[in-house]
Amino acid sequence: MRSGAGMGGQNIIAASVKGLTVALLLGIAAVLAACGGSSSDMQSMLSTDPPEKMYAEADSLMSRGKFEDAAKKFEDLDRSHPYAPEARRAVVLAAFAYYKAGKMPEAIASAERYTTMHPGTKDAPLAHHIIASAYFDDIKTPNRDQAPTRKALEQLKILKQRYPDSQYAKDADNRIRIAEDNLAASEMEVGRYYLEKKNYVAAINRFKTVVAEYQTTRHVEEALYRLTECYLTLGINNEAQTAAAVLGHNFPQSKWYKDAYALVQSNGLSPNADGDSWMTKAWKAVPKFSLGGPSAG
């Protein structure tokens, strides 16, 4: 009986091994078939047209306003002939065509690919300009998410710093002002919210950002007044006096300075800049600023 049982067990094991072997072979065949199909599909995606012909066709689509089709044709050129002279420019033109088609994520992706692969080349300023423009067009109002504003500002500053002589850098100044003003306005909105809630430390952090980073925006005057207000409330008189002094030296005719001057006076103080204050250090580069206590005039 034991012998019979052993033989039966061996038969079951043999059958299982055979089944597993067949399954394994079928699996390998399926993988090979899939790989073969994938390679064939990839080959079929590559155009056999010469690169100059593909470039001309894409350019023609652009001139006729068929921007998305042009972008895809430029991408086909880059994919089919990656080492052709036309391929490098095709990448940035695909980004431009996607931008013109309103396909911002695709435009950003293509332009970023260009700046990664070909930094410092002739078309690099155009690529950064496309990225900046795509983000700039997505700028929201100050009470909404400012991620696109920050990304646009980053690219605009790259244009100014790396490619100061490019046509795109010359056009970037106004956009930089708009982006910075929007970011400052956003910080002010949040700062006012915290101030209303009497969370003075959080409010100071927001107003501080405006004063330290966005000195050329229209919001800096109010930010300095709000800092005067917050610091006085917390009893940090030297910083309150410094905020009022910086405000008076740089914006002597501002209504915010008149209010700040009255506020410090009502507390028995006067505007006076502390040389060790972060505000004094932040404004040292401003020619009009100097230490001391201005009068309200």
Image: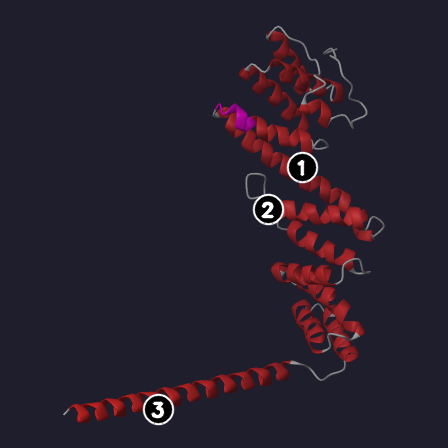
Tell me if residue 14 is in the magenta stretch: no
Q: Taking 37 as reference, is 210 left or right?
A: right
Question: What is the crowding at mark 3: few (fewer than 14 residues within 10 Å), some, or many (at least 20)?
Answer: few
Identify the residue position indicated by label 1 in the image: 181
Identify the residue position indicated by label 2 in the image: 147
Answer with mark 1 or mark 2, whichever residue precedes in sequence.
2
Kind of element beneath mark 2:
helix
Q: Is residue 31 above or below residue 218?
A: below
Residue 295 location in percent, x, y? 74, 10
Q: Which residues are magenta?
A: 198-203
Q: Is residue 146 above or below residue 118?
A: above
Tell me if residue 201 is in the magenta stretch: yes
Give the amino acid type for the residue marked by disc 2 in the picture. Ala
Identify the residue position indicated by label 3 in the image: 18
How far apart in space, not on screen, are marks 1 and 3 (Cα)?
A: 74 Å
Residue at 75%, 13% (x, y): give it: 292
Residue at 69%, 82% (x, y): give it: 47
